Image (cartoon, rainbow, N blue to C red):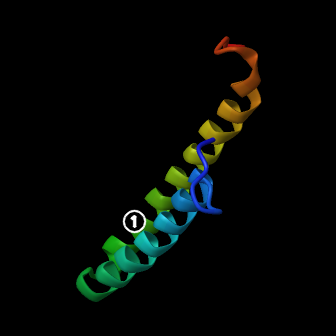
Amino acid sequence: MAKGPGYTIDDLIYYTGLFGGIIITYLLLENLPIHHIIRLIIALIVGVGTGWCATYFFSRNEGSGGDSEF
């Protein structure tokens, strides 16, 4: 991956997600009623699971020259 002054792209993605998540969580907790928050939490759990699966399959197939096992 491209490397800047001591940081990788993965570091940039991680910290962007971290700070973005903190800001979004604060704004949602300030403005949404509880039943919307519960629905949002369920959606986030599903989204994280989907993202984890995509990351797992991408990293597993990364060295295969783009050929997929599916």
- Residue kind at label 1, given as amino acid type: Leu
Q: Quadrant of residue 29?
A: bottom left
The quarter of the picture where residue 70 lies is top right
Q: How many marks?
A: 1
| Residue 61 image position (x, y, % from top left) | 72, 24
Q: Which residue is mark 1?
A: 40
Residue 48 picture quarter: bottom right
Whether residue 12 is situated above or below residue 51 in the rendered picture:
below
Question: Viewed as shown, does residue 24 lie left or right of 12?
Answer: left
Q: Quadrant of the N terminus?
A: top right
Q: Where is residue 50 shown, x and y percent of the image? A: 56, 44
Residue farthest along the front direction in this orientation = 5
- Determine whether 52 is above or below 60 in the image: below
- Does 55 sit left or right of 16 as displayed? right
Please indicate whether residue 23 sits to the left or right of residue 10 in the image: left
Would you call the spot at circle 1 few (<14 residues within 10 Å), some (14-19), or many (20 or more)? some
Give the residue displayed 60% in from the left and 61% down from the top.
11
